[in-house]
Image (cartoon, rainbow, N blue to C red):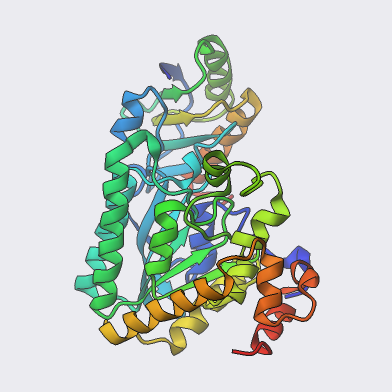
Amino acid sequence: METLDFRFDSKPAGSAAAPALCGVVGSGNLEILIRTGDDPAACRLSIKTSARGFADTWRAVLGDFAATHAAGGTTIAINDMGATPAVVTLRLAQALAEYRGGQL
Amino acid sequence: MNAPLARRSWFEATARARIKGLLDAGSFAEILPPAAAEPSPHLAQLDLPGAFDDGVVIGCGRLAEKAVFVAAQEGQFMGGAVGEIHGAKIVGLLRRAVEEKPAAVLLLIDSGGVRLHEANAGLIAISEIMRAVLDARAAGVPVVALVGGSCGAFGGMGIVAKLCSAILISEEGRLALSGPEVIETVMGVEEFDSKDRALVWRITGGKHRYLMGDCAMLVDDDLAAFRAGAVAYLGEHSEPPPSLAELRASQRRLENRLAAYGQLRDGLEVWAALGVADPQSVPLLERDELVALKEGLPT
């Protein structure tokens, strides 16, 4: 297992009533938990992944997410079992939409 | 019921989606939600990522207006296997049921049994669940197992299922003690070929379990069908007080069953012995046809 921590600048997501959970820790999948963080202009992420050695890929995928979505003011925790970058991107968007109260 | 496109598969759904489809809309309140729960410390020690809810979702809700407690195992996370926290959540829910007396506790089982990574902690968790199920039933709270996930109900969770007031199962569901792979590993492929999927289902699958009387109801692989089945079962069931006479009668039934079918090698042979005229047709029957077949069998 590898533990990775990132912080990216991101536009404020606005406040949400409750944390949101998306996905399942299964083969090729991951779960994402979004909570309110303390810095409204930044998105903090901590990842536990079964696949070692992919820190650069995570940085690229998560940086892209923080740049294209308003995810500031959130703390995101991820448990990963080898999800591909495409699955990670999809789940992040899904989790953020749920966090802001949109039903998916 | 016959429009496949309108169905929402129980087998394919996650634990959370099953709860949502089972209970009255918007009634579920989760206990120890992911943001408040702890992942397994044992998995972290083994350098494995855990799940925030440790693979089981517990909480309170309503089923057709009745207050019920629910625990749903997530089969995609480590095969729904029971670790220390996972087990403690189920035990806590059952103990709370003894005090609060909901109309029922619904166990949405999808599990291969003990989480081997957690060894003794997992084994103890299973035995605590067994005791807690019996305590809840002794307090008059029915405990109903719903089995239709990809991992079935095996190992310790197979025992837990059989300790419940009743089991509702789908054709896709499986129920047994040792899983096919375990039996093949220990006894050899001549004893049980775990790669033979049809054989596995003829021996552990929902239709066989229903024909044998191990499960109270056979339902379609559909969220709405499981809901309707649970509502119907709770509508007519009241939990009887524990009785030694009933336990003895149950023991006799099991002894008779072992004597009658113990030498048979395949579900096909068992069904023929049960009085099914065309055993080969059983795997192809629709749910309603199979229920009609069972009701027509000699008792």
In the rendered view, would you say A1 is above or below B18? above
Quadrant in the rendering for residue B21: bottom right
Left or right: B221 in relation to B252: right
As drawn, which residue projects farthest toward the left? B99
Question: Front-most of B267 and B14?
Answer: B267
Q: Residue B216 placed where, x, y %?
A: 52, 78
- Compared across the picture, whether B85 is left or right of B75 comes to left
Label tally: 0
Residue B163 in the image: state x and y as whole percent.
37, 68
Q: Is residue A51 above or below residue B30?
A: above
* Residue at image coords 30%, 75%: B102
Image quadrant in which you'd find residue B3: bottom right
Residue depicted at 62% across the width and 25% down the height: A84
Front-lying residue, B262 or B119: B262
Residue B46 image point, x, y percent: 36, 24
Q: Is residue B40 left or right of residue B233?
A: left
Res A43 visible: no
